[in-house]
Image (cartoon, grey):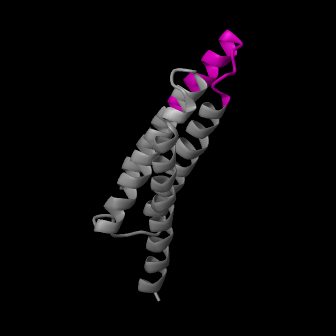
Amino acid sequence: MDKKYIIIALSYALVGLILGSVMAATKNHGQMVTHAHIMLLGFVTTFSYGLCYKLWITNSSTKVAKSQFVLHQLGTILMLSGLYMMYGNLIENHKIEALMGISSVAVILGLILMIYQLIQTNRDNQ
């Protein structure tokens, strides 16, 4: 699971850097919020999860680990897509509010499951 997270994190970084370069080249920074979320939620958080799996979580085949992965990735992709559509004026904000709410909850639940796994790993090693 650790390598999968790192590869995905680096993919988010690539997308974020491309979006940042496009904004710089066009001098249109309308997607700044999307760019920031790609880099922080997509790259940094996903990379951090990969490190957690590499360093502390030894069993990544549990239902909790799989659920955590799916929640974080699905929530992140939905949130980034929603932000891109909102800040690109491709959709009216009120039409995407539910998607943004669901994606936020998914990301938060993914974080809670990561914390749970880290606590459980600590308990197992004592």
The residues colored magenta run: 13-32
Magenta region includes residue 18: yes
User: What residue occupies the far top of the structure in this picture?
Assistant: 26
Position of 22 with respect to 97 (left or right) is: right
Decide whether residue 22 is among the magenta residues: yes
The answer to whether residue 44 is above or below residue 91 is below
By secondary structure, the bulk of the magenta-drawn segment is best described as: helix
Quick check: 87 above or below 102? above
Residue at 54% from the left image edge and 28% from the top image edge: 84
- Residue 82 screen position, x and y as percent: 50, 34
Image quadrant where residue 28 sits? top right
Position of 11 with respect to 24 (left or right) is left
> Residue furthest toward the bottom?
126
Percent of width and height locating residue 40: 61, 44
Left or right of 20 in this view: 77: left
> Which residue: 52% across, 42% down?
42
Q: Give percent across and percent down for residue 85.
A: 52, 26
Near-viewer residue (69 or 100): 100
Image quarter where the N terminus lies is bottom left
Q: Residue at x 51, y 28 (%)?
A: 15
Give the x, y percent position of residue 21. 63, 19
Q: Is residue 56 above or below residue 87?
A: below
Q: Work out whether residue 33 can be spotted.
A: yes
Residue at (47%, 65%) from the top-left corner? 114
